Image: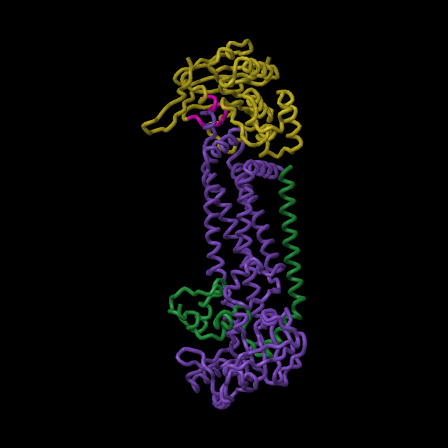
Chain colours: A yellow, B green, C purple
Amino acid sequence: MNRETVIRVENVSKCINRGRPNEVWPVRGVSLEIERAQCVVLKGPSGSGKTSLLSLIGCMSRPTEGRILLHGRDVAKLPERFLTEIRRNTFGFIFQQFNLIPGITVKENVMLPLYPTEMGLTEIKTRAERLMKKLRIYERRHFHVKGLSGGEQQRVAIARALINDPEIILADEPTAHLDTRLSVELIEILKGLKEEGKTLVIATHDPLVYEQGFVDRVVEMRDGRVI
Amino acid sequence: MKYRLFISIIMVEIVILAILFIRGAGLAGKYQKDIEARRMLVSTLMLTDLSIWTEARYTRHPSQTDIFSPFQDYPSSIEHFPAGSILSPEGVYLQRGGKK
Amino acid sequence: MIKHLKILEFALSSLWRRKFKNLGLIVVFSLIIFTLSSIVFLTYSFKREAVAVLKDAPELIVQRLSAGRHEMMPVEYMKKIKDIPGVGKIVPRLWGYYYDISTGGNYTVMALREGLQDKISLMEGSFVVGSGSCVVGRGVADARFLDIGSIMPLIGADGKVRRFRVAGIFTDESNLLTNDLVIIGEKDFREVFRIPQSIATDIVVQIYNPTEVDNIARKIKEALPDTRPITRREILRTYDTLFDWRSGMVLTMFLGAILAFVILAWDKATGLSAEERHEIAILKAIGWETSDVMELKFWEGFIISSLSFLTGLIGGYLHIYFFGASIFSPALKGWSVIFPEFRLVPYINIYQIAVLLFFTVIPYMAATIVPSWKAAITDPDVVMRG
């Protein structure tokens, strides 16, 4: 198997409210390498810096110190426009709070990431329908997301994360709002994604997730450091 | 597809507006004959004003009135005829050489 | 191109979520545009009509002032004016107002000498102002239910009722000029209002050389210090500045509505709720650029304001030129009992429409876009923090 390094995190620190009394360092000097098609779990209690590290990897925020290399390219210093583009083309995000947009239909939520691209609406629709069928929410496609159950909302969020056919999937506490049965279902989905060759980075403290066989590596974090 | 509907509505409205405006421009030409007739009326009857508001001398004959009429009570009183809503005594006043 | 359409599509979906609020906004916004454009159309048509028609108003009118009031003028003044070089024909005018007790209307009564009537058009019947007959405007005819051949009584200064047979009625096309006119013969006029032969209302002076008008007006003023000459140019200038929608009651009446709308729009547009902020962050997190978010907000403002603007403008046009300003007329009419039905020529002033656009659509768009700017440039990782 190809052991290509996809993400290399080099001595990265992140500071919030720098120079002010409430200055905090959620991530301190973390180094990490993630290979293609690996499933890496960031494990640790809340406040350990998992989420912050995830958003740094996902180009949602910039490191204060250190470098993040994506396919060997330093993304930390890129202008916002390029970061957005990387985010759009490379990553799929599954958020803890689902972060679906209320009031619009399931289908539109799934299609949303591809709106500001030049891809035709028909093509986007085909993709969305395929994903919705796969994730068993196709029947719900004309529903508003508020009317869905937690598990269904989670699957909508996953469909949305997958619509751009991302190489890397980042999931932040994906089982936090699910009961055991739904968590197992979710894990099956994640497992399927890994089998498709996607790289997975999951932040969680749920043993149900990190004790799975398909997890290649568990990185334990505490107080912003890898231990 | 909602954007098609929206764009259609906007286009329809623009077309309606264009038709109305073009019709207006066309009518203005057609009304030219009426305007000639009205000009004839003005010159024959020696008219000086439009007959719109008949409630006061200065609203019936704004061009003939003395500059005091719109301010009959005292110079800074609020002009109390509703016609003043679209007719400003100031215009009359200024052209009579009044200072602003 | 397809990208912009898709963002437009989402903007529509997004607005549709609060359809009652946004449709309400469009209705109110349209009403405001309707009102403002109606005023603009109406006043501009009045103005254009006045300037087009009054081109043939008397070149120079001399009236007499006494203690700041318009006074009747001795006919002998004509002799002094006659002596000024460049002065052509001098004609005394006889006109005045008549309050009709039975209808409560004010008429403008004019006297005409016989003999120049054959040129008159825009009327029914015949223009015969011999003794005992009269010609009336449409408004007077309607107020008194007059037809050709009916009797129009006038109460004279001596308290006696004089009866005039209606020989002709002006047609609707001339309403803006003749609506309240009652035209009778000169002899009848003097008798009704008990005005001696020696005086007139004012004097119309014909001038051979149009460039001399101001000069002659000045000379008249010097020769007859208690007179006021009014040139045709002044009449036209009066009408050019007269119609004004900036101040006045119609605007005042709607100021409340406009203010309410401003508050509504302000609240809607600037009060970027936590929910909306969160939405913007989500969009950014799933790969929308700042400029895409701004475009979304642009479309949202554009949808509301363009629909409202066009609807309001069409409504205003129909209101003024098809329905004769029927909604405004109670306000416009004011205290006038005799008020013309408008047959306005649709003159359109593109400049005024542009001003209207600038003062309504642009601020609304700005109020929609500007506040979201700050939310759109923040890092999207706030959505990760729940």
Residue drawn at 59 percent across, 80 percent down? C163
Q: Which residues are magenta?
A: A53-63
Q: Nearer the viewer, residue B6 or C194?
A: C194
Left or right of residue C128, residue B58 in this image: left
Question: Quarter-wise, where is residue A111 in the image?
Answer: top right
- Residue C272's place in the image compared with C102, above or below, is above
Image spot of residue C242 (x, y percent): 50, 67
Q: On the rendered image, what quadrant is the N terminus of chain A found in?
A: top right
Q: Nearer the viewer, residue A162 or C38?
A: C38
Image spot of residue C204 (x, y percent): 53, 82
Q: On the rendered image, what quadrant is the C terminus of chain A found in?
A: top left
Q: Is residue A111 visible?
A: yes
Count of labels in the image: 0
- Residue C219's place in the image compared with A183, above or below, is below
Q: Is residue A86 visible?
A: no
Image spot of residue C197 (x, y percent): 51, 89
Queried whether the magenta region covers residue A194, the answer comes back as no
Q: Nearer the viewer, residue B75 or A61?
A: B75
Q: Nearer the viewer, residue A181 or C319?
A: C319
Residue drawn at 56 percent across, 48 percent down? C308
Residue drawn at 63 percent across, 58 percent down? B21
- Residue A78's place in the image compared with A29, above or below, is below
